[in-house]
Image (tube, rainbow, N blue to C red):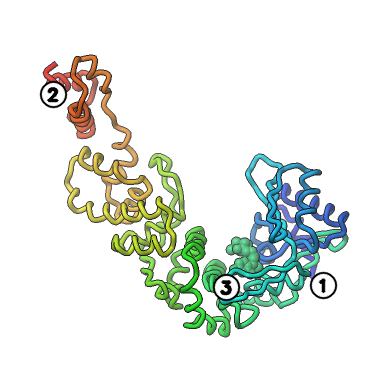
Amino acid sequence: MKKDLRDFMLDPNLIPPAKQILLSDIAAQSASMKMSCYLVGGFVRDLLLQKPVNDFDVVVEGNAIELGDELVRKYGGKLTVHRKFGTAIWFLPSETSETLDLIAARSETYKQAGALPTVKLAAIEDDISRRDFTINTMAVRLDGENFGELIDLLDGQDDLAQGIVRVLHPRSFMDDPTRIFRAVRYEQRYGFKIDADTLKLINPESFDVLSKLSGERIRHEFDLIFEEENAALMFSRLKELGVLDVFNLPEFNLSHSGLLNSEPPIEFGVSADRVLLGYLLWLMDSSKDLIHTLSKRFDFTFELTAASLAAIQLKKDLISFKDSKPSAWTFHLERFSLISIYALWLATNESALKEFLVKWQHIKSNVTGDDLKARGIAPGPRYKEILSQLRAARLDGEVENAADEEKLLQKLTGK
Ligand code: CTP
């Protein structure tokens, strides 16, 4: 019997009403252009799991770019096209910077294990069979009278109901070994199990292909893991399966698991970049040499490399700064990025790091270089010395108001 997901698709708890209108606009437009049009992959999987969905991949049997052009003409927004792949990104006509992917149904072949695929236009059936796991092969028809019809050619529904992550064919991980990371992500995100035969394909042969992938492709997989709530479990599973050892990567320290999902309190003034924070919690106990090696192999951004090195250095410095005055801490900590200081505070609970973030970094002297000039002090390196001493006195509580500061200034300058 055909299954109809119409009710799910009209449920405002699963799909926000504004998005429902958007989908019905796409449905009407594609029907009028006589193009069959489907929502695929994660959308259907999460809809059937009754999880709210906000990420829509629309697959069109036909020209996705023409459909996109018409949608922009009628509803506004902007279209970015990739003619080579027959895909378009529709920047929606709303104030938010939301986008929607319009993809022409395609088949993929891999000339070489691990290489990027060769893409050809095809029917929805081919598009379904190029995918990673059965739970991602379901499609829901959008256009015309068929709105809401579930297309499940490979028993994705059964696997979803049983919580099984299963590849479609034995070469899947050879074609695209990043799917090993994806399998672990789905397994740990939903509390599923990787099917036994699929598990056997995570083996030295697919590891060999994995080890040859570009650093950027692999780093992207780690980025995606750090976006997840269960990132620490995913790392444990990657270790267990031998994936971390393919690259000689350290394990994720499980005592840091709970810290991954913590939002920095506003008064810390640290922007919440959970991916960067994830890397820092992962790598802060490594050696600097390892960071340099990983940075090269996985194409780390400059920010990630610098913050990882900073976190390692700071962790070492904690011992020598233990009983230091606030000024000594502050002048030292100011050389490091806020996120590395925050990560280290999470991991160590060292109160000086919190004091710095919340208070010390904002404490400044009232006196400026102009004030020194006005007193007839010749500009030069002495300015920095005087201003630092004034700020240190503020930080260490030796000076509490402008009058005391003035006295100290007179003492320091003799003027
Ligand atoms: N896909 C695939 N092989 C890959 C990457 C993606 O087959 N290496 C297919 C899957 O069918 C997937 C779809 O492309 O469902 C979209 O990919 P993506 O957006 O990465 O995944 P989602 O299914 O949306 O899952 P997530 O919730 O993790 O974003």
* Between discs 1 and 3, the one toward the N terminus: 1
Secondary structure under the numbered disc 1 in the rendered image:
loop
Q: Residue at x 19, y 49 (%)?
A: 322
In the rendered image, residue 321, in percent from the top left (x then y), is placed at 19, 48
User: Mark 1 against mark 3, which lies toward the viewer?
Assistant: 3
The percent position of residue 310, horizontal first and vertical second, equals 31, 52
Q: Residue at x 14, y 19 (%)?
A: 410
Residue 246 vertical placement versus 415 (above, below): below
Cβ of mark 3 under 8 A from ligand 1: yes
Q: Secondary structure at mark 3?
A: loop
Instruction: Single out the mark in the foreground, 1 or 2.
Output: 2
- Which quadrant of the figure has residue 84? bottom right
Q: Is residue 239 above or below residue 71?
A: below
Q: Which residue is mark 2?
A: 412
Tell me which amino acid carries mark 2: Leu
Q: Which mark is residue 276?
A: none
Q: Amino acid at mark 1?
A: Lys
Residue at horizontal 84 percent and vertical 60 percent from the top: 35
Earlier along the polypeptide chain: callout 3 or callout 2? 3
In the image shown, does 392 or 204 lie closer to the viewer? 204
Discs 3, 2 touching: Cβ within 8 Å: no
Residue at which label 3 appears: 176
Give the alpha-carbon distance from disc 1 to disc 3, as whole Å.
Answer: 32 Å
| Res 73 → quadrant | top right
Q: Position of residue 215 (x, y in %)?
A: 46, 64
Q: What type is the residue that disc 3 sits on?
A: Asp
Does residue 230 appear anywhere in the picture?
no
